[in-house]
């Protein structure tokens, strides 16, 4: 977008000008908005003409601001998307800035989700061609403006590090001085994209994150920092058991607490509003509520697991039926049977859920680490009986999410809007979840049970695989069910198994959907959190039963999948696979998720008391063109750490329907002392970029399990690992 004086507004056509709201005067914004089907956007976008849009703003002071349509919750997307623009624009990195886009799906839709939102490790993948075309068009417009002003041919003008230059004459100009004139010119419909071989910023380790300085100095604004005039704080008293409802409540003691402003009932429970969060929390502690648990979850974890095991023996829904697995198993020379249990898991982002809601004469304004802007706009509008476009969302940086902020029902946003409305709407409301609120009553990665049988023939070849999965299905009953649920089977339940790359001629996968009051949600890497563990441990067991090296065994089954082979070989080589490791066990796993390929080798030491210590992890990743290598390394390291916490100890358990855990004392995060040395190797690639926010998670648990087996001969299948089984190993 080029700032210009108001009298220099460009001519409008049906493709032209959409005005930005961040600057005074008229403005032209450059980008492409391409409504494409899932997984096809990069190839198709190359043939689409760019349309003026709100992605790039070039100001008179020569700064280039990229309007970021995705939430940055620590994964570095503001830097990643700005790097793409800077590369095609030939800007200098020092002039780059970033700000979050307003909620406007017509402009800022995720090209995979078809709504404005962040998730599925799609940010760079879906914006890659979109932003390249936008920046390339902007660059050509700047060159054309210089050519008009200097009266030279555009072909004689170059752009480098933010300087437009006609070398024969020595004439130069900065972007800011050309922006006004450039904005009046036609938008190039087929801008020329740079040859990746000439990339200067994409792939460079010298690109520094844009968000780091403000975070270090404390200048970054999170939702928790937002203060509005006359604002009150709110906390909610929610049912201690999922599905519970209020019979009655007595607010007299709560209202007597100093600083409590109001107490109102809402569909989710009772909201206590106070002058401070502390006052609101003290008021909640004083509140007396009589709950109705007649429709609530009242089972304990052991009861649920027993139910899941029973269901696994019943007829399920067919997810995959290739060949005849039963017949092949009957003829197998050796059959391996195994069970895997996975607990509920909390997301536990560092910044607890919170948002600010203010009702206005025109509608509603929200400040939040907004991850699903379109969903939240619609949900807030529905509560207030207004149009979605009357809901303004100010997206701020978020202190983590791991999926928690992206609920299909916009849960905490709806709570805040509902509370604001119920209290009269005269004062802005800052809703805050405590850590205990989220651990004890949030959304969770589903509890899952797997039962698997796999068979080898007399030559040690895999001939059959029969797989049963029992779980609550995340997508069922949400707006995403239309494309994610087929014949009753949620693709996020089976991903990583139904599409596993190993050459198994007879594969049967059945799903046993469970309905329960416990709310479930995608958790960093979603279904891959458990399917990778099952597949990679089973493959390891099959390899060892066949008397084969686990790497060689995998390579033979992956001959038609070169990118799996590439990361597998690289990780094994860098880890020194097959060489002595001082009595430590080495385990390997390879997995594709979100169209990125990751292999990891874990080096594990077993103590005399049976404790295990992951001392080193070697990771190889193929995520296409590496836009920001340092961020990719950081995301692999972070994913490994997050997955390691789930492998070693994280779990949510229930007693009579209530969650046992409450905070980091009993839902303990990974400690720095648990973190292994990590080496990350990025495969050089010319493929379009894919995601890295989640793919680092799935492979770590099976790599550890396989390493433990290599060291002790004992198999840890279920998560978190029951290390008591290793005593005496």
Image: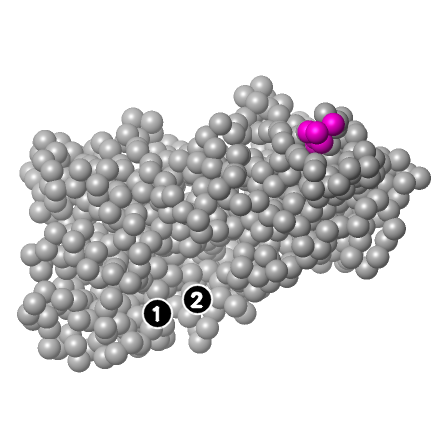
Which corner quadrant of the image does residue 458 belong to? bottom left
Helix, strand or loop status at disc 2: strand
Q: In the rendered structure, which segment of residues is drawn in magenta?
A: 164-169
Quadrant location of the N terminus? Answer: top right
Q: Is 56 in the magenta?
A: no
The residue carrying mark 1 is 511
Nearer to me, 304 or 316: 316
Residue 660's spot in the image, x, y percent?
A: 37, 44
Q: Is 166 in the magenta?
A: yes
Which corner quadrant of the image does residue 323 belong to? bottom left
Taking the image as shown, residue 560 lies to the left or right of residue 235, namely: left
Residue 533's spot in the image, x, y percent?
A: 27, 53
The residue carrying mark 2 is 490
Q: Are marks 1 and 2 in contact (CB under 8 Å)?
A: yes
Residue 518 shows in this picture: yes
Neighbours of disc 1 within 10 Å: few (<14), some (14-19), many (20+): many
Nearer to me, 116 or 9: 9
Residue 117 shows in this picture: no
Q: Earlier in the sequence, mark 1 or mark 2?
A: 2
Taking the image as shown, residue 458 lies to the left or right of residue 27, namely: left
Q: Residue at x 76, y 53 (%)?
A: 389
Which labelled disc corresponds to residue 495?
none
């Amino acid at each position: 977008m080029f700032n210009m004086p108001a009298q220099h507004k460009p001519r409008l056509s049906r493709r032209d000008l959409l005005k930005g709201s961040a600057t005074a005067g008229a403005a032209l914004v450059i980008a492409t908005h391409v409504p494409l089907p899932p997984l096809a956007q990069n190839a198709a976008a190359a043939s689409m003409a760019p349309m003026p849009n709100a992605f790039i703003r070039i100001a008179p002071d020569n700064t280039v601001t990229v309007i970021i349509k995705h939430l940055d919750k620590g994964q570095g997307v503001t830097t990643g998307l700005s790097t793409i623009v800077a590369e095609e624009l030939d800007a200098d990195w020092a002039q780059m800035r970033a700000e979050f886009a307003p909620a406007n799906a017509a402009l800022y839709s995720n090209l995979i989700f078809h709504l404005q939102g962040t998730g599925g490790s799609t940010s760079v993948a879906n914006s890659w061609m979109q932003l390249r075309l936008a920046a390339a068009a902007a660059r050509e417009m700047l060159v054309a403006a210089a050519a008009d002003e200097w009266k030279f041919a555009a072909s004689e003008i170059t752009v480098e590090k933010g300087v437009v230059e006609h070398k024969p004459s020595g004439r130069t100009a900065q972007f800011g001085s050309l922006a006004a004139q450039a904005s009046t010119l036609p938008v190039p419909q087929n801008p020329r994209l740079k040859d990746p071989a000439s990339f200067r910023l994409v792939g460079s380790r010298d690109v520094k994150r844009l968000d780091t300085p403000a975070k270090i100095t404390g200048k970054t604004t999170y939702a928790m920092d937002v203060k509005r005039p006359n604002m009150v704080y709110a906390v909610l008293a929610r049912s201690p058991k999922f599905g519970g409802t209020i019979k009655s409540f007595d607010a007299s003691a709560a209202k007597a607490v100093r600083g409590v402003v109001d107490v109102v009932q809402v569909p989710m429970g009772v909201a206590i509003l106070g002058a401070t969060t502390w006052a609101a929390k003290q008021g909640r502690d004083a509140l007396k509520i009589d709950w109705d648990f007649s429709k609530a979850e009242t089972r304990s974890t052991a009861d649920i697991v027993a139910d899941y095991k029973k269901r696994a023996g019943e007829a399920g829904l067919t997810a995959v039926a290739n060949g005849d697995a039963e017949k092949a198993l009957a003829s197998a020379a050796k059959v391996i049977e195994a069970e895997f249990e996975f607990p509920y898991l909390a997301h536990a982002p560092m910044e607890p859920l919170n948002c600010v809601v203010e009702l206005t004469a025109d509608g509603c304004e929200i400040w939040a680490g907004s991850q699903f802007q379109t969903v939240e706009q619609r949900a807030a509008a529905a509560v207030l009986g207004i149009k979605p476009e009357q809901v303004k969302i100010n997206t701020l940086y978020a202190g983590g999410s791991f999926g928690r902020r992206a609920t299909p029902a916009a849960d905490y946003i709806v709570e805040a809007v509902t509370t604001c409305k119920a209290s009269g709407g005269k004062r802005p409301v800052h809703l805050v979840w405590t850590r205990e609120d989220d651990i004890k009553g949030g959304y969770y990665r589903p509890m899952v049970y797997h039962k698997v049988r796999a068979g080898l023939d007399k030559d040690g070849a895999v001939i059959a695989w029969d797989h049963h999965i029992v779980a609550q299905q995340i997508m069922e009953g949400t707006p995403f069910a239309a494309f994610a649920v087929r014949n009753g089977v949620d693709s996020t339940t089976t991903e990583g198994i139904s599409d596993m790359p190993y050459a198994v001629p007879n594969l049967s996968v059945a799903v046993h959907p469970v309905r329960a009051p416990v709310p479930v949600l995608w958790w960093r890497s979603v279904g891959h959190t458990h399917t990778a563990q099952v597949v990679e441990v089973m493959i390891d067991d099959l390899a060892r039963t066949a008397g084969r090296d686990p790497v060689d065994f995998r390579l033979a089954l992956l001959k038609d999948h070169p990118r799996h082979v590439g990361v597998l070989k690289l990780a094994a080589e860098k880890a020194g696979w097959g060489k002595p490791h001082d009595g430590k066990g080495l385990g390997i796993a390879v997995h594709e998720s979100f169209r990125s390929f990751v292999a990891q080798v874990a080096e594990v030491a077993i103590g005399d008391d049976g404790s295990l210590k992951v001392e080193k992890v070697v990771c190889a990743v193929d995520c296409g063109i590496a836009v920001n290598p340092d961020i990719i390394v950081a995301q692999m390291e972070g994913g490994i750490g997050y997955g390691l916490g789930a492998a070693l100890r994280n779990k949510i358990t229930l007693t009579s329907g209530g969650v046992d855990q409450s905070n980091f004392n009993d839902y303990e995060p990974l400690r720095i002392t648990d973190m292994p040395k990590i080496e990350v190797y990025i495969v050089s690639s010319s493929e379009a970029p894919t995601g890295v926010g989640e793919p680092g998670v799935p492979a770590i648990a099976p790599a550890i399990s396989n390493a433990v087996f290599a060291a002790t001969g004992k198999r840890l299948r279920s998560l978190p690992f029951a290390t008591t089984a290793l005593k005496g190993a």
